[in-house]
Image (cartoon, rainbow, N blue to C red):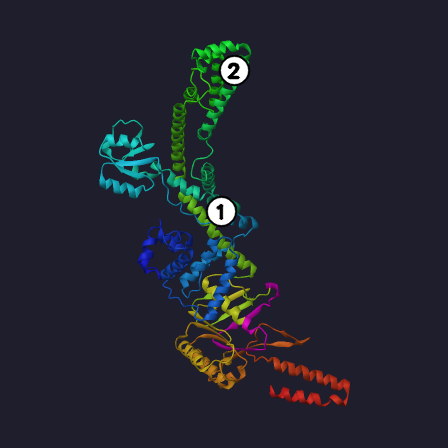
Amino acid sequence: MDLESIPGVGEKTARALSELDDPERALREGDVATIATAPGINQGRAVRIARGAIRAKHDDPGGFLATDRAREIYREVLGLLKERTVTDYAAQRVETFYPSPRRPRIEEVREFTSDAVDRDASAEVLTALADVEPLAQPGDVRVRERCLATADAERYSEAREAIPELSVEIVEDAQGLAELARGYSTVIAIDESFSGVTIEGDVQVRPDALETPAEIVPERPLAFFARNRDRIQAAIEVHRVAGLEADADTDADLDALEAGLAQLGEDGTVAGDAELDRLTTALDDLEAAASTAESIANDRLREAIGEEDVTIEGADLLSLVERGAGIDSLLSRELADEYAVAVEDARDHLADALDLDTGEAEIARRAFGDEPTFPVERDENVVNRLREELTAAKERRAGRLKRELAADLADQRETARTLVREALELDVELAVARFAEDFACTMPKFDWEADTGFAIDGGQSPVLEEPLEEIDPVDYEVSGVTLLSGVNSGGKTSLLDLIASAVVLAHMGLPVPADDARLRRFDDLHYHAKTQGTLDAGAFESTVREFADLAQSGEGSLVLVDELESITEPGASAKIIAGILEALSENDATAVFVSHLAGEIREMAAFDVTVDGIEAVGLIDGELEVNRSPVKDHLARSTPELIVEKLATDADEAATNGGEETAASPAFYDRLLEKFE
């Protein structure tokens, strides 16, 4: 795939996308989360790139939503989908669904939708989805206790690029390696020429190091899994509660991945190893344990000296001092045994408190010498030696465990990516399923060969604010160009919204809110909302120009217009609308024009224009009772006519019951009614 052929992708963006592991798959599948991991691309931009890639794939010119109101309807139905997502990813992902005139794109999404609507959006699954997020990059990983060494400048550059987590040092010979070994815990020589050299310290010769980075820097895969541990565990939970495990092998993979994650600490260290924990605790407690051991020895000696004061005469003690004998001499002569016991207690405490093994305890014993002294003090050199021994043991243990765990998890990386991706895509599917259920949707039937028309049975507009159960289902079928008449507040605008919503959703490949829906494939949707007030001359001219362009190239268009007569004077409006309808009819467009001037327009049109009507049954307690489904080939009565008719009826009843004083009223209303005939 030529990345720069995608609309909106230039050289710089194409370079960023090329850094993804599999950019073609991400673009092909609309994987917004993966696209957003490319350098400098956020999720909003990723959505636009994904949509551009889809358009490029299907040679989609765009522009299906040809007017502001058409775009508003799209945003409203898209918003209803987004409201039913759980994750931020899914909310962004549904933005890649857009109405397209291209049959392959429509069928591609219809295939996705047919699987999605069968999903069970249980509360348990939705709860599990709440913790799923796209996988994150772990950031820069730096390991300072190890380094790579080479004598080759070209190899040096290669090593820095392949394993940026480690420092790379240039050395000339074995002596250079030895010097590095004094500053690093581990030195890894990557030149074959160093094979066979013997150097004190942890110096490894690994010519294959650059080909096996996970072995050299296990922190790399561990950092990835540590950064994403909670996200991966959440995805595993989603797979289990949603029943996405396909077979026993998949379940085994989940178990193995979970076991590996359980061994991983939040900071990328290995957790749950008793020996590593022992060494870590010993290092953490070493200073405190050594101080406590000193106190134990000194407290024991103080007690012994206190008792000795009872038995040693002051003259003897004075004599010792006069002869220049110090406290050490006194301890050696009088309290040698007590000192030995006190020091032994200190040694035992140090070994026991730190849970040292035999070799470590042997070093620890030397922290307190056999020569009596007071106060008893630990030998800092010995304590430091013990610290170094514990540190080395800990690093060896941690390194081995990291390598083992990294080897286990490295093979699971793609599994983790797939788990999270599928969990996030499940959220998208469930949003579609919940939308379809909430609005009683069905998959529309396309007549791919038809030239005009649509039919909706039991349709309920999803963009109305009323609850679904309070919306009257509507049946409506249109072929060619039609005028729609009806009473005020009879639902004409809501019907246009329903038609637009159904057509937009159908061309997105999604289910539509109806019991049944059939339609042709439209090239674009022109929906003109009702104009507020008469337009000035310039705006009027612009509107007429727009319809002129549509009339010339409107074949395959669906045109919905709400009371275009409001753009200018009623007499002129009827003439203009009649001319527009003539042009659209000649061009085989499908159109529904809502108008209160349907009768006048029909008389002025040069062809037999269909007029349908949303008929009011009558007025009940001042409220219109309306049949929301238009009656075919019927000019509906207006609200004023219904009101006059009601007044005439009421006047007749009053005249019958009230006498001569009301006798003139029925005649007046009858005269008004005659004007509507």
Measuring from the top left, give residue 209's x and y in whole percent: 30, 37
Q: Secondary structure at mark 2?
A: helix
Picture layout, residue 337 above or below residue 575: above
Give 149 or 647, whichever is nearer the viewer. 149
Question: Who comes first in sequence, dot 1 or dot 2?
Answer: 1
| Residue 352 is at least partly visible in this image | no
Measuring from the top left, give residue 157's x and y in whole percent: 26, 42
Give 151 or 516, whichever is nearer the viewer. 151
Picture residue at 29% right of the left edge, 44% below the top: 161
Measuring from the top left, give residue 321's x and y in whole percent: 46, 13
Q: Residue 182's quadrant in the figure? A: top left
Image quarter hosting the N terminus? bottom left
Mark in the foreground, 1 or 2: 2
How crowded pointer 2 is (Cα within 10 Å; few <14, some 14-19, many 20+) is rated as some
Picture layout, residue 382 above or below residue 106: above
What amino acid type should be assigned to the residue bearing mark 2?
Ile
Measuring from the top left, give residue 291's x and y in whole percent: 47, 25
Position of 205 with respect to 305 (left or right) is left
Residue assigned mark 2:
305
Picture residue at 40% right of the left edge, 61% below the top: 104
Picture layout, residue 286 above or below residue 230: above
Q: Which residues are magenta?
A: 467-494
Instruction: Return the mark for residue 244.
Output: 1
Q: Secondary structure at mark 1?
A: loop
